[in-house]
Image (cartoon, helix red, strand yellow):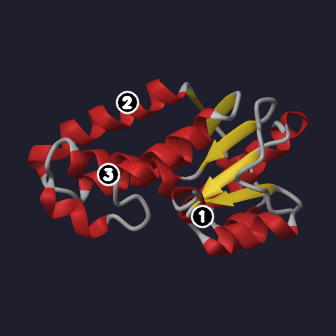
């Protein structure tokens, strides 16, 4: 089921996919660090208002978590950027995790269904597994991917798209 981004979620858990974290870090890198070479990679958070909308949405959840697989994807992205800025980008990732109070959980590959991993990849499967683990917390997955949104809806997992959250209001 799709979630209403306007709904108050004080008693629920937000599970963040790679895309939203990457977008928050990218915006800050362009806006604060003046990494103009990364401006073209921004897709959804292009100004301070959309950044603040996303921050408010994220803050509306009592708990926030992600998987170690997401951190591995962030590493892959950062390694492809200019080497001189990688430490600043990692610093911003740390700051985002800290400011959000974001937990990081391991979902072991051997605990994932092989067919599911082959079809959807270990990152998406790890997010689904986190949603199952925390089903009592009424979790919502925040992503930028329409295919993941569809998979969540089919699995009755609440989901929000960053692009919708960034443009509320």
- Judged left or right of residue 132, residue 41 is left
- Look at 75% across and 53% down and name the residue there: 128
Image mark for residue 27: 3
- Where, quadrant-wise, is the N terminus in this rendering? bottom right
Dividing the picture into quadrants, the one containing residue 154 is: bottom right
Disc 1 vs disc 3: which is toward the camera? 1
- Judged left or right of residue 94, residue 91 is left
Mark closest to the chain's N terminus, 2 or 3: 3
Image mark for residue 156: none
Residue under numbered circle 2: 94
Disc 2 vs disc 3: which is toward the camera? 3
Residue 87 position in % (x across, y down): 20, 37
Disc 1 to disc 2, C-alpha distance: 25 Å
- Look at 60% across and 33% down and name the residue there: 59
Q: Can residue 118 be seen at all in this image of the molecule? A: no
- Judged left or right of residue 24, residue 29 is left
Disc 1 vs disc 2: which is toward the camera? 1
Secondary structure under the numbered disc 1 in the rendered image? helix
Mark closest to the chain's N terminus, 1 or 2: 2
| Residue at the left extreme of this rendering | 84
Residue 111 position in % (x across, y down): 76, 46
Q: Is residue 76 above or below residue 114?
A: above
Q: Residues within 10 Å of mark 2 (few under 14, many from 20)?
A: some
| Count of residue discs | 3
Residue 108 position in % (x across, y down): 67, 42
Mark closest to the chain's N terminus, 1 or 3: 3
33 vs 91, nearest the viewer: 33
Dividing the picture into quadrants, the one containing residue 163 is: bottom right
Residue 16 position in % (x across, y down): 60, 46
Image mark for residue 164: 1
């Amino acid at each position: 089921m799709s979630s209403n981004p306007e709904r108050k979620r004080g008693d629920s858990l937000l599970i963040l996919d790679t895309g939203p974290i990457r977008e928050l870090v990218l915006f800050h890198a362009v806006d604060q660090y003046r990494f103009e070479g990364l401006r073209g990679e921004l897709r959804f958070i292009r100004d301070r208002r959309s950044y603040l909308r996303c921050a408010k949405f994220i803050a509306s959840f009592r708990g926030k978590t992600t998987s170690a697989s997401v951190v591995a994807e962030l590493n892959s992205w950062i390694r492809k950027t200019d080497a001189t800025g990688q430490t600043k980008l990692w610093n911003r990732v740390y700051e985002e995790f800290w400011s959000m109070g974001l937990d990081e959980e391991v979902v072991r590959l051997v605990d994932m269904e092989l067919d599911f991993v082959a079809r959807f990849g270990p990152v998406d499967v790890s997010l689904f597994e986190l949603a199952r683990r925390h089903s009592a917390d009424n979790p919502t997955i925040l992503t930028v991917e329409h295919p993941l949104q569809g998979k969540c809806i089919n699995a009755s997992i609440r989901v929000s798209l960053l692009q919708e959250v960034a443009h509320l209001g």
